[in-house]
C-alpha cells in the first residue's frame, strides 16, 4: 500500500514540475503553470503523508503474539 502512495506522489510531483517548468503551450482559459503548481503541492503533501503513515506503522508493534 505504501509503494502506491510513494509512486503516486512521485508521479504527481514529476507531472506538476513538467507542466510548471517545461510546457509553454497555454490553452484559452487555463493556466498550465498554476495547474502544475497545484499538482506539485498535492504530490508533496501526499509524499509526506505516506512517509508519516509508513513511519508510524513501523513504530507501533501492535499486539504481541499469543503464547504457546
Image: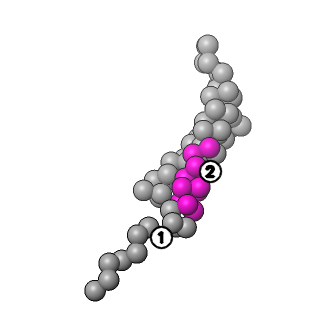
Provide the residue span drawn in magenta.
45-56
Q: Where is residue 63 in the image (x, y as percent from the top left)?
A: 40, 69
Most common SS among magenta residues: helix
Question: Residue placed at 71% from the left, 37% from the top?
Answer: 21
Q: Nearer the viewer, mark 2 or mark 1?
A: 1
- Give the side of residue 64 with respect to residue 46, left or right: left
Question: In terms of secondary structure, where does tag 1 sit?
Answer: loop
- Per the image, is 46 magenta? yes
Question: Total of numbered circles in the picture?
Answer: 2
Front-most of 33 and 7?
Answer: 7
Quadrant, the N terminus: bottom left
C-alpha distance separating marks 2 and 1: 22 Å
Q: Position of residue 2 (x, y in %)?
A: 47, 57
Q: Name the residue under label 2.
A: 48
Label at residue 8:
none
- Badge 1: residue crowd in 10 Å (few <14, some 14–19, many ≥20): few
Reading the chain from its start, which is encountered first: label 2 or label 1? Answer: 2
Q: Mark 1 points at which residue?
A: 61
Asked if residue 39 is positioned above or below residue 63 in the image, the reply reads above
Front-most of 1 and 21?
Answer: 1
Q: How is the image coloured?
A: one colour
Amino acid at each position: 500500500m505504501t509503494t502506491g502512495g510513494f509512486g503516486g506522489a512521485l508521479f504527481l510531483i514529476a507531472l506538476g514540475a513538467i507542466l510548471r517548468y517545461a510546457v509553454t503551450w497555454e490553452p484559452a482559459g487555463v493556466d498550465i503553470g498554476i495547474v502544475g503548481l497545484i499538482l506539485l503541492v498535492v504530490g508533496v503533501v501526499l509524499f509526506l503523508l505516506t512517509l508519516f503513515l509508513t513511519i508510524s506503522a513501523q513504530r507501533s508493534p501492535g499486539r504481541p503474539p499469543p503464547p504457546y
